[in-house]
Amino acid sequence: MYSEWRKGLKAAVPVIVGYVPIGLAFGILASQQGLTVGTVFLMSLIVYAGSSQFIAAAMMATGADAVSVISTTFLVNLRHLLMSASLSQHMKKFSTKLQSIISFGITDETFAVSGSYVQNNIATEGYFLGLHLASHGSWILSTVLGGIFGSRLTDTTKWGIDFALSAMFIGLLIMQLKDKKGLLVSLCAGVLSLILRINLNDNYNVIIAAVVAATIGVVTERWSK
Amino acid sequence: MEQIVFIILGMSIVTYLPRVLPIIVLSKTEAPEWFMRWLKYIPVAVLSALLVPEILVSENVVNLSLTNKNLLAAIPCFLIAYKTKNLFITVITGIIAMLILNLIFAYV
């Protein structure tokens, strides 16, 4: 049991190394946009999803309403469905209670680690809990530290940290573009979102553009068959 | 303040459901195949939909000129992301690029 926990904790190391700079950046940005350290802590504790936290903080700063923030968060985090679906095949023996605890810790990064681990190993309760607790703990800690640190910086825009979010989107996007259909969906979503943003000037451009572009992707798949 | 706590609670619920439901449900039923394929496009679509206006729009106008710092900083990010496939190096590149651009714009 302890050795399984240890395996999980070890597997969390690259995730933690990745989370710390992004977490600090989030804390700094969020506090710069007027969120308190307590709010940052609460968000990292119960939402725990990097890019959606950045987006929510940015939307809140522009005065977006609750429905648009929550629905955008839902769409941004909907991708966890696929990871959860994939992991479900390796958690059949776990109790529903344990499944519901472990599933809370599914993120792009923990899934990148655990998803490949379960291909060649039997993943245990200890492995998942060790990986997820260490990863989640490092996210909470780094975002809160960023929040404390950030609230003492008056103008971080001159440091370039305000571009961290766009840079993260670029990195995630490039890593997820694997074929022409992905590129087509990406271009459709980008152009549509741009047009909607200029003309509607509200925060629904992302949701509408993403849903339409993903549908275009599925439809063109049928045509090309 | 209450409004923010309400938003965070809502975010928490809508984030948790897609994480937990497939694991609990999928052992019993199977999602339609087209839906799974549709879902696969969602991350790329959402990221692009967020990114493009972020880079190209300043003060509600599309700015494709050399005065658009976000657009200029995005160029090295795309190159480094493509070369390294590393999220964190890409983020650091973006921050450094913006830092340099801020310095240049301050003195030109």
Image (spheres, coloured by chain):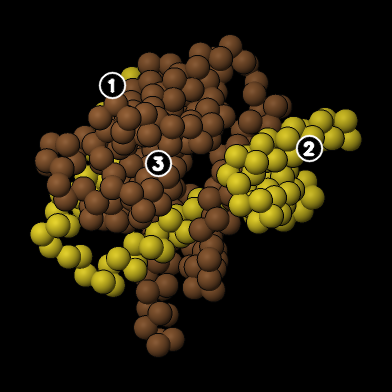
**Horizontal side, residue A135 vs residue A183: left or right:** left
* Label 3 element class: helix
Q: CA distance from mark 1 to mark 3?
A: 31 Å
Sequence order check: which comes first, mark 1 or mark 2?
1
Location of mark 1 (residue): B2
Of tags 1 and 2, the one toward the viewer is 2
Q: CA distance from mark 1 to mark 2?
A: 38 Å
Q: Residue at x 17, y 65 (%)?
A: B30
Q: Residue at x 79, y 35 (%)?
A: B100
Q: Where is A81 relative to B97, above or below?
A: below
Position of the N terminus of chain B, as image quadrant, is top left
Location of mark 2 (residue): B101
For the residue marked with disc 1, what is the amino acid?
Glu
Instruction: Assess disc 1: are there few (<14), some (14-19) or many (≥20) residues with their C-alpha within 10 Å of its C-alpha.
Output: few
For the residue marked with disc 2, what is the amino acid?
Leu
Q: Position of residue A134 (x, y in %)?
A: 38, 27
Q: Position of residue A225 (x, y in %)?
A: 40, 88
Q: CA distance from mark 3 to mark 2?
A: 34 Å
Q: Colour of chain B?
A: yellow
The chain coloured brown in the image: A
- Front residue of this view, candidates B32 and B97: B32
Q: Are marks 1 and 3 in contact (CB under 8 Å)?
A: no
Q: Chain of mark 3?
A: A
Location of mark 3 (residue): A110
Determine if residue B19 is in view.
yes
Spot the residue most to the right. B108
